[in-house]
Image (cartoon, helix red, strand yellow):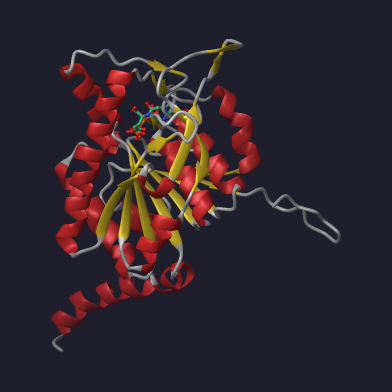
């Protein structure tokens, strides 16, 4: 090998070998990746996202994608002359709006992601929470200022059946899930926040990691006044912060807490606007967003930590 070729080739080998401990650690582990609608607006980013997910698959992990589509739903509702309104961070979803939500999530956003992933092989299979009872929900009525408020067809998850997703993973596929659920009580279809759905699936699947891709660098300590990102926090620390959080961050951080308390090792909020942020997060030391971990167990003999 000529000296020049060696000089260009060796740094590449170095980068590959740096990933070895991470490849060993994550081999065979399930990672649930939530791709937010706000991070999904750029064509190059969507293509890079698909590459990263396929990379994880071929590196021996089991990625499960849960996608959002908030901005895409708002645009479609607008075209139908339906006004978008949010209460407690959730979209007020009338029966007519629900038809649009379902059409956009399952018929457009999910199809597009499945198409991008399948450019790399026969890998992705799309489903919604309705399929094989994957997500069952009941009508959600949030409490606002001490009163229960009716926000229409918004679902609260009551059960997860991981059977269909596990069968797809066992078959070497990449499930792509839309956050729509069916109620077993009234038979209606419900709109579920995609962060909440991703977190519930991560916990039910016993995933190692929940990764939430969004359009900010992570959880800002003092949003919107400063852009200081909290890089790591425990479940209890996050629980104390929750009442002070606003808008889109509420379901994300509630989801991270639910996932970690449900046994997921780490839940991360990362910047989906950074190309290949998933690879940086999984295969390097340079985690770029906010990582939530379980509470640390107290040290010393007889110490009984939280699990
Ligand atoms: N503490 C915070 N840190 C970061 N972002 C915050 C915070 N509080 C509220 N936000 C808002 O939450 C948004 C992300 O949520 P959302 O718009 O629902 O995104 P997505 O479509 O990715 O789910 C950010 O763009 C920001 O405007
Ligand atoms: C009940 C509720 O609010 N559902 C969300 C579902 C999509 C979603 O969560 O998309 P993002 O992740 O892009 O925000 C909605 O209708 O916008």
Dividing the picture into quadrants, the one containing residue 285 is bottom left
Q: Is residue 130 above or below residue 24?
A: above
The answer to whether residue 212 is left or right of residue 274 is right
The answer to whether residue 280 is left or right of residue 126 is right
> Horizontal and vertical percent for residue 150?
47, 14
> Horizontal and vertical percent for residue 100?
24, 26
Q: Let me know if residue 234 appears in the view.
A: yes
> Horizontal and vertical percent for residue 249?
45, 30
**Depth check: 35 or 270 in front?**
35
Q: How many numbered marks, from 0 up?
A: 0
Q: Is residue 185 above or below residue 200?
A: above
**Depth check: 92 or 11 in front?**
92
In what quadrant of the picture does the N terminus appear?
A: bottom left
Q: Is residue 263 above or below residue 60?
A: above
> Horizontal and vertical percent for residue 168?
35, 61
The answer to whether residue 260 is left or right of residue 251 is right
Q: Let me know if residue 45 appears in the view.
A: no
Q: If the picture is divided into quarters, which one holds ligand 1?
A: top left
Q: Residue at x 56, y 40 (%)?
A: 257
Q: Residue at x 44, y 70 (%)?
A: 27
Q: Residue at x 34, y 70 (%)?
A: 59
Q: Looking at the image, which residue sits at the far right?
A: 302
Q: Residue at x 52, y 20 (%)?
A: 141
């Amino acid at each position: 090998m000529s000296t020049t070729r060696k000089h260009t080739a060796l740094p590449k080998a170095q980068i590959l070998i740096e990933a070895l401990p991470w490849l060993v650690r994550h081999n065979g582990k399930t990672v649930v990746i939530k791709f937010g609608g706000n991070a999904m607006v750029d064509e190059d980013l969507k293509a890079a996202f698909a590459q990263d997910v396929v990379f994880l698959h071929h590196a021996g992990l089991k990625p499960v994608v849960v996608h959002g589509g908030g901005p895409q739903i708002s645009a479609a509702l607008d075209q139908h002359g339906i006004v978008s309104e949010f209460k407690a961070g959730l979209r007020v979803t009338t029966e007519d709006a629900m038809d649009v939500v379902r059409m956009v999530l399952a018929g457009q956003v999910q199809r597009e992601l499945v198409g991008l992933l399948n450019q790399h092989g026969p890998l992705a299979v799309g489903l919604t929470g309705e399929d094989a009872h994957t997500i069952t929900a009941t009508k959600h009525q949030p409490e606002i200022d001490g009163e229960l408020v009716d926000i229409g067809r918004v679902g609260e998850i009551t059960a997860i059946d991981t059977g269909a997703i596990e069968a797809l993973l066992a078959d070497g596929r990449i499930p792509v899930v839309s956050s729509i659920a069916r109620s077993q009580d009234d038979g209606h279809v419900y709109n579920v926040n995609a962060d909440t759905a991703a977190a519930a699936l991560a916990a039910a699947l016993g995933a190692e990691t929940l990764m939430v891709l969004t359009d900010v660098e992570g959880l800002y300590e003092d949003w919107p006044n400063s852009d200081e990102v909290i890089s790591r926090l425990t479940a209890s620390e996050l629980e104390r912060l929750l009442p002070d959080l606003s808008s889109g961050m509420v379901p994300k951080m509630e989801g991270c807490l639910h996932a970690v308390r449900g046994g997921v090792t780490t839940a991360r909020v990362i910047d989906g606007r950074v190309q290949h942020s998933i690879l940086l997060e999984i295969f390097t030391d340079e985690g770029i967003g906010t990582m939530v971990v379980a509470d640390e167990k107290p040290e010393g003999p007889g110490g009984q930590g939280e699990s």
